[in-house]
Structure formats: C-alpha cells, structure tokens
Image (cartoon, helix red, strand yellow):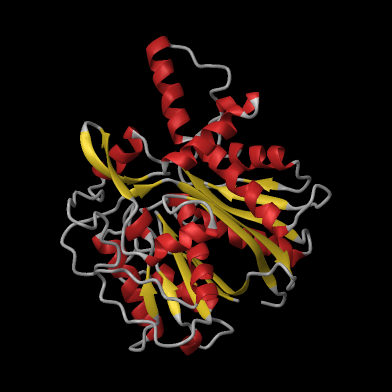
C-alpha cells in the first residue's frame, strides 16, 4: 500500500461490553456471552447487550425526539460513533467521511411496520425513511454534524470490512483524509432467527458452548446470532493517536455454488488472503481471526483455504463467534477490535475447545477474515 493508513480509534458495543477494559477482561475468560431467550416459541441461544448497555441505548433513544423512531441498529451506530471520534480527537471543525453498513438494516423496525400494515392496511408516515439501509450513516452524520460523504451498504456478513476497504479507497484517492467506517446489527428478532433456522444453521446445542465456531469436528451447525456495532477511525499516515496500521487488504468474490455457501476450499478467501499478503511474507503473519460462523461447511472451507495459502506452518487461528455469536454486518470490525487488543496486550485469545496452538512468540501482524452470503470475502492485515 503506497500510503500508510492508520486506525486512530475504535469503539464497539456487544455482549462483551462497550469499553476496552471490560471487553478485554471478557476475552480473557473462557465464558461465552450467550443467554437463553424465547424466539418462535423456542428456547434460543443469543448474545445480547447487558442490562446496563440496554439502558444506555434507551437513554440515547429518549435524548432526541427524532431518535424515538429509529431502529436499534441505528442507535448502536450512533453510540459507538460518538465514542470513536472522541477517542480520535476529531472536533466539530474536522471534515470526515462515514461508511457504516449493515447486513439486515432496521430489522426489528421493519418487521414492526410490516405487521402494522398487515393488520391495518396502512403504512405509518415514517415507515420508509426509518427502515432504509442508508438511514444508518445519515443519522450518524446528523448526530455528529459531519460535513463529509456518508455511505451505507450491505455486503451481508463482510459489510464492516468492506466499509473499511471503501474508507481506504477514499483516503488513497486523495478525496478525503479521514473516514469513520464499520458496521451495526440488531438481528435478534423472531423473523431473522426463523430465517436462520430455515437454513438449518442455527444452533441447537445445549452444552457448555452453544456455538462451536472453529470446532472442525462438530456434527451439527451451531451458528448463534448476536447484536452489536463497531466502528473505527481511519486516517492517512501515522499520528500520535495511531493504535494500529493497515498492512494489507484483500478482497474477492467467487461464483455462487449455493445461495448461502462458499466453495469447499473457499477460493474467495484464498484470493483475498493472497492479495492482503502482497507485500508481506507468509511467515510474518502470527495469527488469523477467522470468520468461522459456527457452521460445518463455513468453518471447514475457510480452514482449508488457510491451509492452501499458508501450507503446513499455520499461524495461530481463532475467532470470537463462539463467545459473542455472529453479528452479521458488524462482525468483521469486532474482529478488528479483537486483533488490536491482542496486539496491544501481546496475548493470543484462543477458542477453548479448538485445540489451538498456544502463543509462543510476539504478536506483530494479525489477519482478519470476513465473508458474506455469496462469497464476498475480505482479508485485512494489521500491525501496531
């Protein structure tokens, strides 16, 4: 990459919490963040915000009369965006772009408005503007009073990392020198979970680990959904606020074999990882935070792709979905946050049941993978 691109701040909200210390402490233990709740008249594992964070979101919703009509996915994005730009030191007079996406968008609100329509035959006046996908970045822009471009998109589960790619492209083009990028997801609804059950990928496990992400020997799919959002601030060059540097980026899309799957050896991941490693020796990658959604085929195909690229000497492999579930469009940026925390603390966070290698050398470079329905893969390599 001809220009140094720095991450100068990152902020998130999820089952892990919303401040770096609590998030890191939650990563250090072997406990997952799942609870049992009723969806579709079935006991269902989900990863939700704790009561304290839910209260914060309710208070945000009440803080402005216009926010009362917004979906949780938008409110999550506003909450984390405020924190991120404060950490980065972006003042009111700073011009920056915004690209925050979501796989599902305003899921809960859309379902509510549609139910009201079915029952009454009428749509509420705010049904359309509050459920469009572009509604996320536009409201974040309104809240932060930003003057730059605002973009929202859905590239399913790789949405947040595609937002990061977009931000880098804007910075490298010279059209901007600061960009706020990430993803937000509030998918814990009856209809969304019913869709995952219809695909036969939602977890039915009732053991100690409902989501068996990165268990390559599992006999049943174990995807669990979680809610959350994460954004980071991108800037050109190193600054006194730099917390990580983008070493390489890669992306690829493969021909569809099935609506929800990638090929057996995830050729999209092979291509995206190879591109991200263009200026880096394979042996210099210390760890990979895998997408690993907890499905049998999804986990195994990504693992085979890593084997194809890295050969017999694999980096340390991990994922956070066994702990916080799959947050769809937000998941890639939550993995970036995990990578930064591991680099800062020089501690590898493994998956307790995966039999992963232990951390035996300094962590200098970590790769993060994400892929969405249809094989839209992204790989990002970061260092301090």
Of residues 45 and 182, the one nearer the viewer is 45
* Identity of the residue drawn at 39% across and 66% down: 28
Whether residue 290 is visible: yes
Quarter of the figure with residue 40: top left
Q: Percent position (x, y) of residue 319?
A: 38, 66
Find the residue positioned furthest to the left. 219
* Identity of the residue drawn at 61% across and 42% down: 78
Vertical placement of residue 129 versus 21, above or below: above
Of residues 226 and 112, the one nearer the viewer is 226
Vertical placement of residue 334 versus 244, above or below: above
* Identity of the residue drawn at 26% across and 46% down: 199
Q: Percent position (x, y) of residue 119?
A: 38, 13
Of residues 155 and 341, the one nearer the viewer is 341
Q: Percent position (x, y) of residue 66?
A: 64, 26
Q: Percent position (x, y) of residue 237?
A: 74, 72
Find the residue positioned furthest to the top. 120
Whether residue 334 is visible: no
Quarter of the figure with residue 115: top left
* Identity of the residue drawn at 48% across and 57% down: 22
* 373 sits left or right of 22 in the view: left
Quarter of the figure with residue 301: bottom left
Q: In the rendered view of the protein, which quadrant contains the N terminus?
A: bottom right
Vertical placement of residue 310 versus 49, above or below: below
């Amino acid at each position: 990459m001809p220009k140094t691109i720095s991450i100068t701040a990152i902020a998130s909200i999820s089952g892990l919490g919303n401040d770096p210390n609590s998030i890191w402490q939650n990563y250090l233990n072997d406990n997952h963040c799942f609870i049992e709740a009723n969806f579709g008249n079935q006991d269902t594992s989900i990863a939700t915000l704790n009561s304290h964070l839910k209260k914060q979101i309710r208070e945000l919703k009440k803080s402005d009369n216009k926010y009362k009509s917004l979906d949780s996915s938008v409110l999550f994005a506003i909450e984390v965006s405020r924190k991120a730009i404060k950490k980065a030191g972006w003042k009111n007079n700073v011009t920056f772009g915004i690209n925050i996406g979501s796989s599902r968008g305003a899921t809960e609100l859309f379902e509510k408005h549609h139910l009201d329509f079915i029952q009454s035959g009428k749509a509420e006046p705010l049904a359309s503007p509050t459920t469009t996908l572009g509604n996320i970045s536009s409201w974040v822009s309104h809240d932060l009073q930003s003057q730059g471009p605002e973009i929202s998109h859905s590239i399913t589960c790789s949405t947040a990392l595609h937002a990061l790619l977009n931000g880098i492209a804007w910075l490298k083009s010279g059209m901007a020198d600061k960009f706020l990028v990430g993803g937000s997801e509030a998918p814990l609804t009856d209809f969304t979970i019913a869709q995952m059950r219809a695909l036969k990928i939602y977890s039915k496990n009732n053991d100690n680990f409902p989501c068996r992400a990165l268990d390559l020997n599992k006999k049943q799919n174990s995807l669990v959904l979680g809610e959350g959002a994460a954004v980071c601030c991108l800037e050109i060059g190193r600054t006194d606020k730099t917390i990580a540097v983008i070493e390489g980026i890669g992306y690829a899309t493969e021909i569809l074999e099935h609506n929800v799957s990638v090929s057996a050896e995830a050729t999209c991941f092979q291509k995206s990882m190879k591109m991200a490693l263009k200026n880096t020796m394979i042996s210099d990658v210390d760890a990979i935070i895998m997408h690993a959604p907890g499905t049998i085929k999804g986990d195994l195909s990504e693992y085979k792709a890593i084997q194809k690229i890295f050969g017999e000497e694999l980096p340390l492999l991990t994922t956070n979905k066994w702990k916080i579930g799959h947050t769809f469009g937000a998941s890639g940026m939550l993995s970036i946050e995990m990578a930064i925390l591991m680099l800062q603390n020089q501690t590898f966070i493994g998956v307790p049941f995966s039999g992963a290698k232990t951390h035996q050398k300094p962590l200098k470079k970590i790769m993060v993978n994400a892929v969405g329905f249809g094989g839209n893969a992204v790989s990002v390599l970061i260092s301090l």
